[in-house]
Amino acid sequence: DGGITQSPKYLFRKEGQNVTLSCEQNLNHDAMYWYRQDPGQGLRLIYYSQIVNDFQKGDIAEGYSVSREKKESFPLTVTSAQKNPTAFYLCASSIRPPADTQYFGPGTRLTVL
Amino acid sequence: AQSVSQHNHHVILSEAASLELGCNYSYGGTVNLFWYVQYPGQHLQLLLKYFSGDPLVKGIKGFEAEFIKSKFSFNLRKPSVQWSDTAEYFCAVNARVTGGGNKLTFGTGTQLKVEL
């Protein structure tokens, strides 16, 4: 069953702690993306990667970090520097870099207490 | 910077009513256009897309959208909505940005509620 998996579905962390969100795809897509979804604000791009070992900042990269060591995996770390980390995080992938259709995972809802 | 505007934030309709959700974008070059839908508790999925050709595109579940280049618009339509269409709808525009590469920009979304 091909697709994008994100884990966990719900995540709770204490303020000041770093947390890593997982994103895996078995679609053999080159490009992967992380978005943040907040009510009334749509989706905003955090980071994207067009190829393994390469990634670029999106519109709201501050307080986040990523890695792309494998084609299938694009984990996102929410650091303690992110001032308002509570949000719904969506991972997506596309066959080629951003001009192509993006397919989304089920998301991770992060709550920082 | 490119932007995408969805004028209706919340829409409430009765079953069988017709639907039109507005989407306008601010970019003068070549664009690829998308509508995504997020049903309650489900992940974001593609409803339809326009890359080129016939400006009237048909998607899943009876939805269609029309690209009007002169108006920078890509409105979503459905002749007769069903209760199961209750969801949040996002318009997105993919365009080339300064410095090279493309970027997908989303609108803020429209929450549609269909009442029985």
Image (spheres, helix red, strand yellow):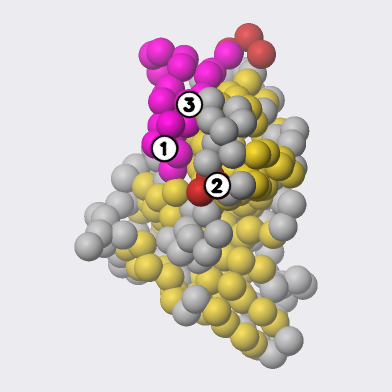
* Amino acid under disc 3: Glu
Question: Please, what is the three-letter code of the amino acid marked with disc 2?
Answer: Trp
Q: Is residue A9 above or below residue B65?
A: below
Same chain shared by disc 2 and disc 3: yes
Point out the stretch of residues depicted in magenta. B46-68
Left or right, A54 with respect to A60, comes to: left
x 52%, y 64%: residue: B41
Q: How far apart are the two marked residues, 2 and 1, measured between alpha carbons? A: 12 Å
Q: Is residue B99 placed above or below B10 in the rendered structure?
A: above
Which residue appears farthest toward the left when viewing the image?
A1
Check disc 1 and report the residue beneath it.
B61
Element at badge 2? helix
Identify the residue under disc 2: B83
**Image coords of residue B78 (percent x, y):** 53, 29
Q: Which residue is mark 3?
A: B64
Question: At which x and y percent is residue B73?
Answer: 63, 21
